[in-house]
Amino acid sequence: MSKKEFLDLLKSYLEGFGQEEKKDILYDYEEHFRIGQENGKSEDEIAKELGSPIDIANQYREANGMDKVNVYGSQKSVGGSIVTFIGLLMFNFIFVLWIYIGVISAVIGVCIGAFAVTVSGLALVFASVFGGWFIPYIQTPDILSRVAVFFGGIGTLALGLLMCIAMFYVVKIAIVLTVKYIKWNIKVIKG
């Protein structure tokens, strides 16, 4: 590869860098060629020693927090994107979808359970205070029984509220992980 070809490729792969930064990088590699030629090396030998322009550009891009350039240039070809999309679709359908449905079903079930425990605790508290007229099994004139039901209701209510709070965070984590997975799929498809 000639010096001009090498520097032209490197310049094209440094797309997105500022003019000054790009100019400094290209100047460094021009110096490599100049020093190599002073030492009697051919342009082709120097280019082989320096490595691939795309690898060099990707090192700079990675150091600056930019996306790497792939062999298709800055974007994956349409055909490559379609093949990747179909492969990911099959993988997601065969493996990920069923696990995801199971996990989401479990989360929904525990959320419903947390709500049910909270409502049960509330019902026990009201039954002990108002004499259980709406829950026939708790109609007892005994004050100790009512106090026991009241504190049992408070404990059940507290447990239900704690479960609801915990499930709020579990749902929040599930949403964040779902969004990250979708973004990862898009990134893989784009290349």
Image (tube, rainbow, N blue to C red):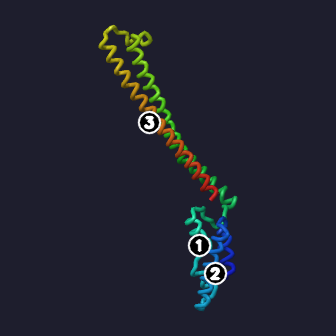
The amino acid sitting under disc 2 is: Glu
- Residue under pointer 3: 166
Q: Where residue 120 appears, x then y in whole percent?
A: 42, 22
Instruction: Report the side of 105 relative to 135 (left or right).
Output: right
The amino acid sitting under disc 1 is: Ile
Cβ–Cβ below 8 Å for labels 2 and 3?
Answer: no
Instruction: Report the side of 176 relative to 156 (left or right).
Output: right
Residue at screen point 34% across, 14% down:
146
Secondary structure type for disc 1? helix
- Residue under pointer 1: 56
**Distance between the Cα atoms at labels 1 and 3?**
48 Å
Instruction: Report the side of 98 relative to 30 (left or right).
Output: left
The amino acid sitting under disc 3 is: Ala
Please state which of residues 15 and 49 is positioned toward the viewer in this rendering: 15
Residue at screen point 60% across, 64% down:
68
**Distance between the Cα atoms at labels 1 and 2?**
14 Å
